[in-house]
Amino acid sequence: MKEPKYKRILLKLSGESLSTDGEVIDPTILGQYAAEIKKVHDLGVEVAIVIGGGNIFRGASAAKAGIDRVQGDYMGMLATVINGMAVQASLEKQGLYTRMMTAIKVEAVCEPFIRRRAMRHLEKGRIVIFGAGTGNPYFTTDSTASLRAIEIEADVVLKGTRVDGVYSADPEKDPTATRYTNLSFTEAISKGLKIMDTTAFTLCQENNVPIIVFDMNKEGNLAALVSGEDVGMLDGLTIDYYGMQTPISGAASITTPDARTIAIKPFEKGIFAEIEKSIRNSSLGLNPMNDGELIRLSIPPLTEERRRDLVKRVKQEIEVAKINIRNARQDGNNSIKKLKGDGVSEDAIKEAEDKIQKKTDAYITRIDQVFNEKEKDIMSV
Ligand code: UDP
């Protein structure tokens, strides 16, 4: 098996990433995140997590509501403890060993943060969750992530978001936002990119800890990143490079000079044709233009037709997800039926089958919701 690129990671999750419209902490998201974290842990990577509290309380907004700022910040820090405990519970459900350590003592449920102890836990394969921020008001959990990463000697800070990288503006609000594939700390600070606060950036810059921003909601993204793959639009496309199937990102540098262009600069002239072929044969529907120096991909503006195509593709994915859920129901029901011979009563079997059906219905409803939201999102001009 290929060695993962990072041995010890610090994963930063915002509090808001755990919430959905109806729920402050959504159990489905918790379950998904735990499954993603398990994949990385299974690769032999040591995982530490800093969790935010913005879904429950933020000191700065409390100040606007007339609550003393420092008091509000402590409330925010305690909110991160609640989120951390939720994450801890979902990780343990996956069979992982965990420890939660906090900067403010909450002795009945968490250990106090002690650096050496945290590192020992990680070495033993336990996932360590850092709660209560830095323990100081006027800081954020982004700064906490950078600080703890440095303290525990993590190789990288991975900031999980709902978008696939760092953009010039919030891509959920501004469709012209450009994605940066590579960005220096100085550039990020000078451009005033709001993806992490300046303290968090500066701490990592001074201590040579890279920060990677990635889409935590895309299945398999975290594990791909930790394994050393670039996670982007050309993700998954490979070429034959010296007899080995290699991701395009491993044989070329990829940049996005503007919102509608991807520029690919192959490391060698001889592989232009291979890269073009791989893009043409993919389902991206893009036409590579080669000027001898660069391969450019123009991302077409979303016409009505293209939007409908995208919705169709989402629908296909949704159907696959539904089939998977129904298969899981089938497996569950089969296991229950086997219990009949073991003296389990008809009533208990019926009850278990009802429970499975309810769970199936709940997930199918959730999937339909996701589809409706995505369809709206794609079709809105
Ligand atoms: N906070 C703090 N000091 C810290 C970390 C967090 O005072 O070291 C407080 C602050 O009020 C912040 C709140 O905790 O607004 C929740 O953290 P954050 O806003 O960073 O959470 P996220 O946006 O990541 O969910």
Image (tube, rainbow, N blue to C red):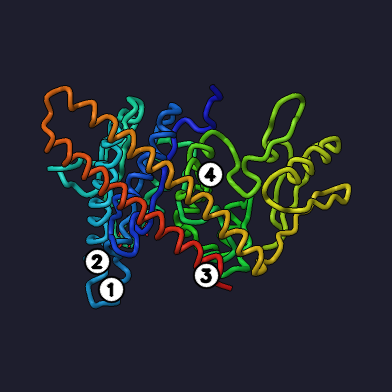
Which mark is first along the chain, 4 or 2?
2
Name the one closer to the observer, 319 or 123: 319
Task: Please name the residue that numbered disc 1 is placed on.
Answer: 63
**Residue 215 in picture, x, y percent from top left:** 50, 51
Q: Which amino acid does label 3 sit on?
A: Lys
CB at mark 2 closer than 8 A to ligand 1?
yes
The answer to whether the residues at label 2 and label 1 have Cβ atoms under 8 Å apart is yes
Local crowd at mark 4 within 10 Å, few (<14), some, or many (≥20)?
some
- Residue under the point 50% across and 33% down: 6
**Residue 63 in picture, x, y percent from top left:** 28, 73
Q: Which amino acid does label 1 sit on?
A: Ala
Local crowd at mark 3 within 10 Å, few (<14), some, or many (≥20)?
few
Residue 117 is at least partly visible in this image: no
Q: Quadrant of ligand 1?
A: bottom left
Query: Helix, strand or loop at disc 1?
Result: helix
Which mark is first along the chain, 3 or 1?
1
Q: How far apart are marks 3 and 4 (CA)?
A: 27 Å
Q: Nearer the viewer, mark 3 or mark 4?
A: 3
- Residue under the point 29% across and 45% down: 87
Task: Please name the residue that numbered disc 3 is placed on.
Answer: 173
Q: In this view, which residue lies farthest toward the right? A: 292
Which mark is first along the chain, 3 or 2?
2
Task: Please name the residue that numbered disc 4 is placed on.
Answer: 210
Query: Helix, strand or loop at disc 2?
Result: helix
Q: Which of marks 2 and 3 is in front?
A: 3
**Residue 348 in picture, x, y percent from top left:** 13, 36
- Image quarter in which the C terminus is found: bottom right
Q: In this view, does 52 lie to the left or right of 228?
A: left
- Residue under the point 34% across and 60% down: 20
**Residue 171 in picture, x, y percent from top left:** 55, 64
Q: Is residue 232 left or right of residue 97?
A: right
